[in-house]
Amino acid sequence: MPRLSWLAIIVLLLCGCTPWRQYFANGFKVGPNYCTPPAPVEREWIDAADERVRSEEDDLSAWWRVFNDPVLDNLICTAYRQNLTLREAGFRVLAARAQLGIAVGNLFPQSQYMAGDYSHNTLSARTTNNLFQFGLPGVTRYFNQWDYAIGMSWELDFWGRFRRAIESNAANLDASVANYDDVLVTLLGDIASNYVQRRSLEQQIVFTKENVELQQETLTIVDARFRAKTISALDLHQARSTLAQTQAQVQDLEINRRLVENQLCVLMGMPPQELQSLLGSGAIPTAPAEVAVGIPADLLRRRPDIRRAERLAAAQSAQIGIAESDLYPHIALTGSLGYSAANLSQLFEPAAATGSIIPAFRWNLLNYGRIVNNVRQQDATLAGLIADYQNTVPNGSREVEDGLVRFLRAKLRTKFQTTSVDEAEEAVKLALLQYKAGTVDFTRVTQLELNLVQQKDILAQAKADIAQGLVQVYKALGGGWQIKCTGCEVLPVDHPEMLDKTPPQELPAPANDGKNETSSENPAPE
């Protein structure tokens, strides 16, 4: 009969998912060993032949400095110090680090305790077989009990269950750090994008107000001709309508400017407030003539979201081994050592010692259907995460390509749009002269003035698109997260670089006044 029992155990052990040869090759761990899955990447960018696109790798740790705009630099630094979403991501890193520590601790005895107690006991005199009624030595109805013991329970990591848990939690920690970096990259890109939009709206407002002044002059001319009774009231009403329409457009742009400023405030971790004194007046950031993008394969190590997706797959791979370990018996040692005595003075005498050691195993023999399906579930989850990782790579490449084509084509678009605005201005001037001379009707003048409003608005957007395209490129390349290592400094308002950009002002107080950017107020992972 014992032989049959051992034979049954051996047969069941062979029913596991991991072959014995692989078990030994894995370092006495069941489940697969993880290796980075392949990801599709192109050899070069679509616009690699453009002379403005450099294929060599560049330092993107402070890419926003290519705009040479101290106001933008201050916004970036303030957002890094104070943004609450980034701070939340930092605390998630700390939580993942603590979880890894818990997993490491499971390699050692999982249950450890020290216990002690005292009790005063009274036995019933009315129970059957009570010995104290016979007056036997050492048998009494009333007695004290002192106890002290230490004990532990240790499940041995025979199948690599706890070591796989350490692998999984270590990969999750890496993923949380990559998530922090990804939040940081997104934050810096959003700050730059909203700042460019703010400057673009500022320029659009200037252009639209210039058109308001032009249309007011036109209205003066129309009103004079109407008073002279050389035109009908139709032209007067049309001129007033055109002017009111452009004035309404100014208010619409002011609304959009306020919305962008409110978004900037939230990104900088502070309640919405007036930012005019902080931002001052300035032109749309000027982008350099060329951009260094490296090669597409660089995204695999540079973009935090790609690194995060790969690390999540690694964490899930270890979960397969954890699930598979349930197919095998869990071997444990339980032991205790203590003392028990009637008197406290005798508690630690050798004769009062007690103890036990219990080797044991637990085997879920009748749960194989559930266990195997749990392994299959973990395996399918891994396959899904691998697919997500492989999908993240081409999506990252697409974002870079989108930014590149926007950056490159917006330059040419701005050139043509500038010509369009110049010609539209000349057309309006000629139309007004001809209107004064009575050779064209006012409808033609109105059409040309409205066209000028539209063309100037498009010109401001085209100029902003150059900078927005470059911001999108750098954001898509995954640059900027290195600021957590280098730190940053908010320039004082009396700094020479700030004097030409903004009037005297007070910057928002940063959350961390020191130079150490990894404080608990905004934890930055290493």
Image (cartoon, rainbow, N blue to C red):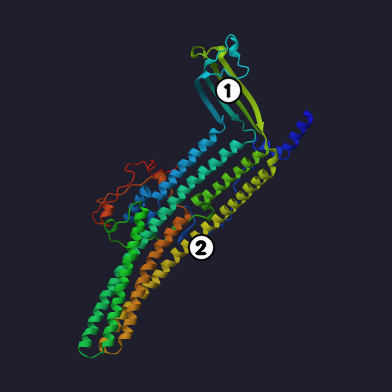
Q: Residue at 39% of width from left, 41% of height from top? A: 520
**Side of 102 where 470 appears, left or right:** left
How far apart in space, not on screen, are marks 1 and 2 (Cα)?
75 Å
Relative side of 401 to 228, left or right:
right
Quadrant in the picture for the C terminus = top left
Dot placed on the residue nearer the N-terminal end, 1 or 2: 2
Q: Which one is nearer the viewer's eye here, 95 or 227?
A: 95
1 or 2: mark nearer the eye: 1
Residue wearing tag 1: 336
The answer to which quarter of the image holds residue 487 is: top left
Q: Residues within 10 Å of mark 2 (few under 14, many from 20)?
A: few
Secondary structure of the residue carrying numbered label 2: loop
Q: Nearer the viewer, residue 331 or 103?
A: 331
Residue 60 is situated, as x and y percent measured from the top left of the image, at 43, 52
Quadrant into which the N terminus falls: top right
Residue hosting label 2? 49
**Residue 526 visible in the shown view:** no
Looking at the image, residue 227 lies above or below residue 521: below
Contact between marks 1 and 2 (CB within 8 A): the answer is no
Q: Is residue 12 visible?
A: yes
Q: Is residue 100 above or below residue 196?
A: above
Q: Amino acid at mark 1?
A: Ser
Query: What is the number of the mark on residue 18?
Result: none
Q: Position of residue 222 (x, y in %)?
A: 24, 84
Q: Which amino acid, by three-letter code, is at mark 2?
A: Ala
Residue drawn at (36%, 48%), measured in percent from left and top?
A: 82
